[in-house]
Amino acid sequence: MANSFKKNCIVLHENCTTALDSRRVESKIDLSFLDPPFNQDKAYNMWNDNLPPAKYWRWMHEICAKVYALTAEGGAIYFMQREKNTEFVLRCLHDTGWTFQNLIIWKKKTSAIPGSKRFGKHYQIITFATKGKTPRIFHRLRIDPPLPVGYKHARENGMFVTDVWDDIRELTAGYFAGDEALRDGEGNRLHKQQSPTQLLLRIILSSTNPGDVVLDPFAGSGTTLVVAEQLKRRSIGIELDSHNVAVIQNRLAEQRKSDDVSRFFKDYACTPDLETIWGARGLNRKSASSAETDSKQMAFLESNQ
């Protein structure tokens, strides 16, 4: 499948290791989101997810170094991984020049994975780092979640987003995936590691302005690109699997109702200058009706299987 180019979005059907060396990737990336295969022996069409650990982390080191070289001064990276790999992620970023900012805990809403000899696992990590000591852009977003038990008085103006994110639902657990999860005609998940739009919305709003360039070297189902487009950011996605590339192109061609991030605008209503951060026209885009768009996408995806 050929690479695809839109006005504000490029999808490269390539191996990210080689694509990051090409001239098609801009040399001034403002934000990168890394959600690579976790080396858990998952069944990927085009990738061996069971590499020797040393080989896997040498590869991650190479990717982080290449992204660093392409990033503008003050640009950001958000590197998502399993909690047990925290030490390796921090070392990988440090050794390739990145400056640590936060270790974000993305607490899952499903039941914890039990352990017989340790506490159950209930979160993933997202490491936020920058090229240089000071982020070029960092918007202090405010949210207004439900008050914890025991609180007596409502907040006057919400609260700042902290490094614990417990208000974003994951899409990887069966029925809990909801309507946002991409499925084929038989209801099977098209990408079991699909990231929620709500997660990428928070990351992109926090660390970019409209017009900035967002990179996803492991684009998967294209969530980063779908959210970036709605927020008037330019984006570059790299994806090895041709079926995933088809999914991305179709999501970008016609927005599903479940991909529309404007439904989350109210969650950040306490944030100063939110409309400017969001992108002036971001709230005006009309998504196609859910039934019409999803039926068209279902036919397209089935034809590309």
Image (cartoon, rainbow, N blue to C red):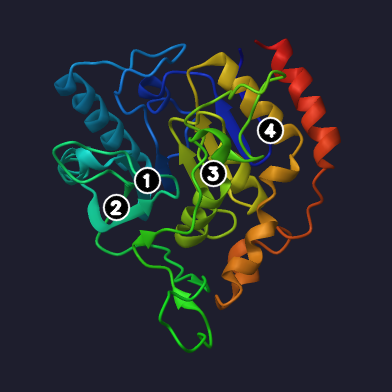
Q: Residues within 10 Å of mark 2 (few under 14, many from 20)?
A: many
Circle 2/circle 1 CB separation < 8 Å: yes
Mark drawn on residue 251:
4
Q: Which residue is mark 2?
A: 131
Gap in Å between the C-alphas at discs 3 and 1? Answer: 25 Å
> Which of 17 and 282 lies nearest the eye of the viewer?
282
Gap in Å between the C-alphas at discs 2 and 1? Answer: 7 Å
Viewer-side label of 3, 1? 3
Vertical relation: 81 (above or below) 74 = above
Q: Which residue is mark 1?
A: 71
Circle 2/circle 4 CB separation < 8 Å: no
Circle 2/circle 3 CB separation < 8 Å: no
Q: What is the number of callouts on the image?
A: 4
User: Which SS class for mark 1?
Assistant: strand
Vertical relation: 248 (above or below) 301 = below
Which of the image's four quarters has the N terminus?
top right
Res. 91 in view:
yes
Of callouts 2 and 3, the N-terminal one? 2
Q: Please, which residue is most extreme toward the front here?
A: 116
Report x, y in % for residue 88.
17, 38
**Residue type, mark 4 in image:** Arg
User: Which SS class for mark 4?
Assistant: helix
**Residue type, mark 1 in image:** Thr
The residue under the point 25% across, 42% down is 83
Of callouts 2 and 4, the N-terminal one? 2
Report x, y in % for residue 104.
32, 55
Q: Residues within 10 Å of mark 3 (few under 14, many from 20)?
A: many
Which of the image's four quarters has the C terminus?
top right
Gap in Å between the C-alphas at discs 2 and 3? Answer: 26 Å
